Image (cartoon, grey):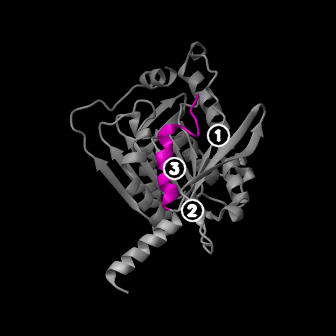
Amino acid sequence: MTKFSFTAFLLLMAAALFAKGVECNTYIYGVQGNDTLRIDKYAVPAVEGDTALRPVVVFAFGGGFKGGSRAAADYLPFFNHLAEQGVIVVSADYRTGLKNLDPASVRTPDDFTMALQNAIGLAVTDFYGATAFVIENSEEWQADPSKIIACGSSAGAITALQAEYMLCNGSPLASTLPDGFNYAGLISFAGAICSEGSPVWQEKPCPMLLFQGDADKVVPYGEVLAGGKGLFGSSVIASLLKDMKAAYWLYTVCGAGHEVAGTPMSENLDEIVFFIRRCVSGGKAVCTETVVPARSDYKKDFTLEEYLRSNLQ
């Protein structure tokens, strides 16, 4: 076979693989009170004879636990790109526990912390429900239940990180998941863990890819404490994972704010696909940090009051 004909053969094979394009299918995965919870599944249909199992990204949207949409237009190119790379993407609804919060009712930092903890608990419960639905349908979808990746943006990144943290610490909220289950990886776009004191994992967590700007005044890159409880952002999480000799990749954008909740979905696709292929599908640990330098001086230290104002706007 000549070089030309071999190249043409490869192109034809690729064209056949993606001939049908990415399909989106919607399913109801749960009902909580008056809330009907749905997922959208993005995948390229398998060609006849292809029995390979695919990794799955379970994605939680951003919106400050006040709003947001699993099908926001900004997310769709990211979902489609991953699907074209052979990944099944599941974008899930979850209950937004702060949507009816009256800012006037938040008189102290403790008031907000309590409301936030409740909202995170609702979101994590639903995230586990969506994950369980993926596992239940994995055979039909040709999904690999041992290669499920938690992922989210902003409030959704907090949800994904908290879900892994609580799962590793034996939370009863995770009882909907099979015994012994853990996520195979985690991708966070500007997320944090909510904890009383510095986070402590009883079990070693899954490999994590953590994107965040160090000038984020919505979700702390470092930590912010109120009443003994706090939010611990990407730099703190990475430091703790390093001490545990757990796999992680901290990607810091110096001088960037909360826009990093979205920008990696278009600007860092290569890094994301590399992480999925090497750390999740390949099972090879990565312990590294990437720092994108700032172009000018900037403020990166914020008070508790500044974080509260940003989240109550």
Dot 2: element: strand
Mark 1 surroundings within 10 Å by alpha-carbon count, few (fewer than 14), some (14 through 19), many (20 or more): many
Q: Which mark is residue 79?
A: 3
Q: In this view, which residue lies farthest toward the left?
A: 296
CA gap, disc 3 and disc 2? 13 Å
The amino acid at mark 1 is: Asp
For the residue carrying disc 3, how many other residues have a C-alpha within 10 Å: few (<14), some (14-19), or many (20+)? many
Query: Which numbered disc flags the more N-terminal residue, 1 or 2?
Result: 2
Judge depth for marks 3 and 2 and give the one in front.
3
Q: Which residues are magenta?
A: 67-85
Query: Mark 2 sits on what residue?
Result: 55
- The residue tagged with tag 1: helix, strand or loop? loop
Point out the tag, 3 or 2, that comes first from the N-terminus.
2
Q: Which residue carries the number 1 mark?
A: 93
Would you say 306 lies left or right of 116 here? left
N-terminal of the pair, mark 1 or mark 3, is: 3
